[in-house]
């Protein structure tokens, strides 16, 4: 059995070497927590040793929670943009209406979500979401917390106690919010049959046409086209998954305006976002009153790329 002991020893040495290499890149705090929560150590080391994963050099964040401005959504209600959203709704009518039949969520609302989130699936993002989520999950790493405290410390080494407390609270919040997403991403990769480093999305770690975070994919991902898998890059699956998310958060036919707003709020905790989704959905469902030929004429005009990052996902941008 000597050869068995040799293999085991070599394997242990390789893992330790991998962990040490990753430690040099700054990810050990996160890696050890993933392993403690049941993700195979070999898999964690392999992911963070991937040369595509940049070293962790720190995450700056503000003590206060940022809020989205209404100005970032104004473009979605411009006539040309509404026309593009209507084309999205028409082009994928079968997918949106199938999602409505299956989950009882307005096809116009689902179309509005997919259009605002990714321009109807045209701009899902090119960032490695493992790296993006991992950075946010590292907010509460002790050295990172200390560096953020030092940013608000004066030359005499003093910091307002309330500010220091806010920084620590915010760091815990970011870790509690995004660490589960990193852990879930490994499960998502298994279900999709891909390497975790290959999943691409927004700069804040959301992916696919509806810009789901990994935990939302696991909870609400739906196979809309019946091919036996869930891909948020397929419009049928994206529409079905989005509708399932809304149904899971209380959407049903006949809701009041207040109740509809409460459901959309769960998707993104932003009053500006909620207003825009519902306003765009209403306009999508209303035929243009003036110059109908003008809309047809613009069908092949490429609409501007759309990008939206939720309040939760924007919070790490100090």
Image: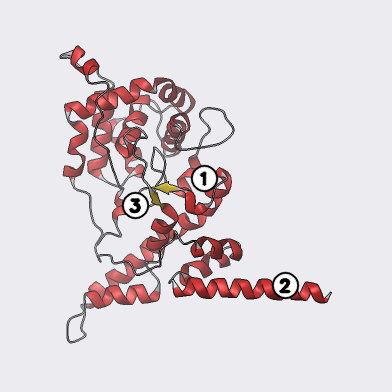
Can you give x and y, in whole percent of width and height, for residue 276 in the image? 24, 36
Which residue is identified by label 1?
Answer: 218
The mark closer to the camera, 2 or 3, is 2
Left or right: 37, with 104 as reference point: right
Q: Note whether 302 is above or below 74 in the view shown.
A: above
Please, which residue is most extreme toward the front here?
Answer: 51
Q: What kind of colouring is applied to the model shown?
A: secondary structure
Q: Secondary structure at mark 3?
A: loop
Labels 2, 1: front one: 2
Which residue is under mark 3? 203
Q: Tell me the quadrant of the picture where the C terminus can be found.
A: bottom left
Between 7 and 214, the one nearer to me in the picture: 7
Q: Tell me the element at label 2.
A: helix
Q: Position of residue 155 (x, y in %)?
A: 17, 84
Looking at the image, which is closer to me, 239 or 269?
Answer: 239
Residue 16 appears in the picture as rendered: yes
Which one is earlier in the sequence, the residue at label 3 or at label 1? Answer: 3
In the rendered image, which residue does mark 2 sit on?
8
What residue is shown at x 60% (from left), y 64% (from top)? 42
In the drawing, does residue 187 fall left or right of residue 156?
right
Circle 3 Cα neighbour tier, 10 Å, few/some/many (<14 / 14–19 / ≥20): some
């Amino acid at each position: 059995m000597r050869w068995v002991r040799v293999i085991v020893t070599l394997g242990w040495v390789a893992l330790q070497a991998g962990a040490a290499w990753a430690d040099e890149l700054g990810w050990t705090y996160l890696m050890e927590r993933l392993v403690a929560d049941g993700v195979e150590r070999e898999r964690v080391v392999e992911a963070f040793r991937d040369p595509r994963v940049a070293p962790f050099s720190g995450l700056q964040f503000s003590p206060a929670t940022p809020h989205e401005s209404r100005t970032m959504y104004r473009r979605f209600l411009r006539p040309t943009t509404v026309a593009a959203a209507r084309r999205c709704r028409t082009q994928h009518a079968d997918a949106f209406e199938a999602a409505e039949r299956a989950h009882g969520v307005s096809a116009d609302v689902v179309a509005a979500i997919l259009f605002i989130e990714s321009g109807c699936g045209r701009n899902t993002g090119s960032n490695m979401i493992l790296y993006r989520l991992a950075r946010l999950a590292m907010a509460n790493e002790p050295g990172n917390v200390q560096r953020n405290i030092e940013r608000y410390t004066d030359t005499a080494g003093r910091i307002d106690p309330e500010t220091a407390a806010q920084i620590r609270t915010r760091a815990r919040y970011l870790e509690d919010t995004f660490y589960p997403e990193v852990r879930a991403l490994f499960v998502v990769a298994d279900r999709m049959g891909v390497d975790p480093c290959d999943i691409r999305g927004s700069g804040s770690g959301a992916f696919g046409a509806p810009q789901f975070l990994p935990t939302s994919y696991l909870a609400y991902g739906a196979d809309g086209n019946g091919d036996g898998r869930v891909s948020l890059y397929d419009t049928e699956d994206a529409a079905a998954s989005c509708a399932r998310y809304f149904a899971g958060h209380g959407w049903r036919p006949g809701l009041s305006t207040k109740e509809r707003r409460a459901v959309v709020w769960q998707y993104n905790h932003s009053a500006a976002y909620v207003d825009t989704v519902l306003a765009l959905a209403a306009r999508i469902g209303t035929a243009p009153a003036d110059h109908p030929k003008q809309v047809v004429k613009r069908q092949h005009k490429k609409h501007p790329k759309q990008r939206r990052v939720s309040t939760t996902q924007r919070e790490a941008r100090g």
